Image (cartoon, grey):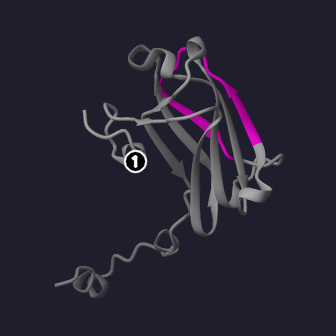
Amino acid sequence: MLGFGVDQLRDDNLETYWQSDGSQPHLVNIQFRRKTTVKTLCIYADYKSDESYTPSKISVRVGNNFHNLQEIRQLELVEPSGWIHVPLTDAHKKPIRTFMIQIAVLANHQNGRDTHMRQIKVYTPVEESSIGKFPRCTTIDFMMYRSIR
């Protein structure tokens, strides 16, 4: 298995992973070009494969930059296997608008030093399409022009 870099966090391959190096907390920073509405953060963890490299305590922080990050969730993971869904909502259950998400691995299972993270996905709220607001047109005149030729 080649590569243990950041690219492995987004390669849609559950067999690869990012491996941290150095002292805790291990940080993954996700920055957006513009303020973005986010609803859910999903992290794939696999204790059976990663053992002491598996995160056991994670902090999720959001903000405009590194200097004003606020913790919105702290998770205790017990031998996780699969996708962990972290709601990114405010006190009123509304999705958060942010420039940055930081995932901090505060501790690993078995007091492991470095960590493995297999996949990270960030989801935005699904917005209703404007197409769905139009009535269905079934006249013969309309049907003639319904497909692009």
Position in image of residue 121 (x %, y %): 49, 46
Where, by quadrant of the figure, is residue 84 drawn? top right
Q: Secondary structure at mark 1?
A: helix
Position in image of residue 62 (x %, y %): 71, 52
User: Residue extending furthest top?
Assistant: 110
Residue at image coords 76%, 52% = 69
Residue at image coords 60%, 46% = 40
What secondary structure characterizes most of the magenta part? strand
The amino acid type, in three-letter code, at marker 1 is: Arg
On whether residue 86 falls in the magenta region, the answer is: yes
Where, by quadrant of the figure, is residue 143 drawn? bottom left
Position in image of residue 65 (x %, y %): 71, 61
Residue stretch rendered in magenta on the structure: 72-88
Which residue is identified by label 1?
A: 10
- Few, some or many residues within 10 Å of mark 1 (<14, 14–19, 20+): some
- 72 to the left or right of 121: right
The answer to which of 132 and 12 lies nearer the viewer is 12
- 67 to the left or right of 58: right
- 95 to the left or right of 115: right
Where, by quadrant of the figure, is residue 105 drawn? top right
